[in-house]
Amino acid sequence: MRRRGFPTLGRCEPTRILLRTYEFSPANPRVGWPEAVTELIARHILRVGHDYVETFPVVVIEGARQVGKSTLAGQLMHGRQGASATLDSPQQLALAKDDPESFLRQAAEGTLVIDEAWRARG
């Protein structure tokens, strides 16, 4: 089954897995929470994120503004082969909308991190 809006790349059809982040960044701790608790939550989310990246072809990191989604994506990419693209870039956004298959092939070998993917809607 092909999901609307996502091209199928070879045999790999995207599977949506949600990893919600809440105050991931120790630099942005929850008010009143001890730093050790914030770091424990961050380590747990990072461990789960690594498991998801190893298991699923697509991982969506979802959360409110400024909770550390981009930071988490960067940490999950550390030491992995792949590429990163942000749809804040007008060139990357145009490529994603006009030729999504070419856009997704930027990381033919490895992982592709797409930051601000919501901008490609519509």
Image (cartoon, helix red, strand yellow):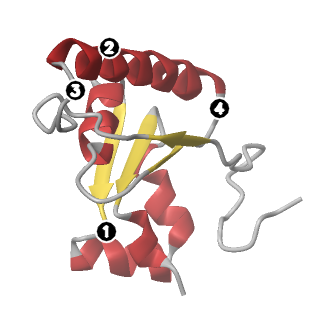
- Which of these two is toward me, 103 or 46? 46
Q: Mark 3 points at which residue?
A: 33
The residue pinned by badge 1 equals 87
Badge 2 element: helix
Residue 36 against residue 93 in the figure, above or below:
above
In the rendered image, the residue lying farthest to the front is 32
Q: Position of residue 66 (x, y in %)?
A: 23, 53
Q: In which quarter of the image is residue 4?
A: bottom right
Q: Position of residue 37 (x, y in %)?
A: 28, 16
Query: Disc 2 vs disc 1: Cβ atoms closer than 8 Å?
Result: no
Query: Does label 1 or label 3 sit earlier along the sequence?
Result: 3
**Which of the two discs, 4 and 2, labels the residue nearer the N terminus?**
2
Mark 4: which amino acid? Phe
In the rendered structure, the answer to whether residue 38 lies left or right of residue 64 reads: left
The residue indicated by pointer 4 is 56
Question: For mark 2, what is the residue?
Answer: 40
* Distance CA(mark 2)–CA(mark 1): 31 Å
Between circles 4 and 2, the one closer to the viewer is 2
